[in-house]
Image (cartoon, helix red, strand yellow):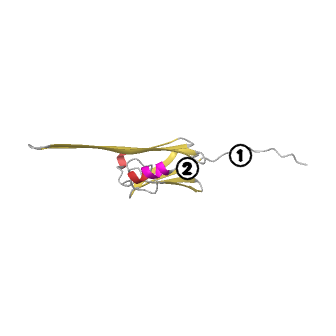
C-alpha cells in the first residue's frame, strides 16, 4: 500500500465538486421522488397508518389493502403550455410515489377507512381477531 494513501479521498473530492447539492450526505433527492414519512400504530383493535403527503390531490391517492400488506400510490402529471406570437413555452412535470408496507398483524380489508386532511393520509385498519382453538379438559 502506498504511504499516505487515503482510500476515501476520491469520494471527498467528488462531494466537494458537487457541493451545490443539499442534505447531510450531499445527495438529497427532490421531494417528488421521496417516500412519504409513515407511522404505523397499534391502537387496540385497529392499526392506524399516518402518511405525510403535503400538496397531494386527494383524488389521485390510491390505497389498497390485503390482510398483510398496505399499498399506497399517488401519481400526478402537469403539462403547461403557453403560446404567443414571439415565443412558445412548454413545461411538463410528473411526481408521485408507490409505497408497500408489510403489516405487523393481519387486518380485515373490508373494514379499512382512509381519510386525507391537511396533508396527512390516515388509514384505519380493523385487526383480524385470531381464533384460539379450544381444548378439552379431562375432569378428574
Counting from the top left corner in percent of width and height, residue 103 is at: 57, 47
Crowd band around label 2 with a 10 angstrom C-alpha radius: few (<14), some (14–19), many (20+): many
Q: Check residue 11 for magenta coloring.
A: yes
Q: Secondary structure at mark 1?
A: loop
Counting from the top left corner in percent of width and height, residue 62 is at: 42, 43
Residue drawn at x 43%, y 49% as measured from the top left: 14
Q: Secondary structure at mark 2?
A: strand
Farthest front residue? Answer: 3
Q: Check residue 72 for magenta coloring.
A: no
Question: Mark 2 sits on what residue?
Answer: 126
**Label placed on residue 21:** none
Farthest left residue? Answer: 85
> Quick one: 72 or 116, which is closer to the camera?
72
Crowd band around label 1 with a 10 angstrom C-alpha radius: few (<14), some (14–19), many (20+): few
Q: Which residues are magenta?
A: 9-14
Question: Mark 1 sits on what residue?
Answer: 132
Q: Is residue 14 visible?
A: yes
Residue drawn at x 12%, y 43% as measured from the top left: 87
Q: Could you give the CA–CA distance between mark 2 and mark 1, rounded to whole angstroms? A: 18 Å
Q: Is residue 19 left or right of residue 86?
A: right
The answer to whether residue 107 is above or below residue 24 is: above
Counting from the top left corner in percent of width and height, residue 114 is at: 45, 50
The reply to whether callout 2 and callout 1 are in contact (CB within 8 Å) is no
> Quick one: 30 or 24, which is closer to the camera?
24
Q: Is residue 27 visible?
A: no
> Quick one: 130 or 97, which is closer to the camera?
97
Counting from the top left corner in percent of width and height, residue 26 is at: 43, 53
Amino acid at each position: 500500500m502506498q504511504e499516505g494513501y487515503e482510500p476515501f479521498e476520491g469520494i471527498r473530492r467528488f462531494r466537494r465538486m458537487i457541493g451545490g447539492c443539499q442534505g447531510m450526505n450531499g445527495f438529497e433527492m427532490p421531494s417528488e421522488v421521496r417516500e412519504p414519512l409513515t407511522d404505523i400504530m397499534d391502537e387496540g383493535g385497529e392499526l392506524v397508518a399516518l402518511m405525510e403527503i403535503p400538496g397531494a390531490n386527494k383524488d389521485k391517492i390510491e390505497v389498497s389493502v390485503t390482510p398483510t400488506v398496505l399499498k399506497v400510490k399517488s401519481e400526478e402529471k402537469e403539462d403547461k403550455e403557453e403560446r404567443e406570437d414571439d415565443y412558445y413555452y412548454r413545461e411538463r412535470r410528473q411526481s408521485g410515489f408507490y409505497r408497500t408496507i408489510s403489516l405487523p398483524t393481519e387486518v380485515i380489508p373490508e373494514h379499512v377507512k382512509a381519510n386525507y386532511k391537511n396533508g396527512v393520509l390516515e388509514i384505519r385498519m380493523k385487526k383480524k381477531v385470531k381464533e384460539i382453538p379450544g381444548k378439552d379438559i379431562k375432569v378428574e
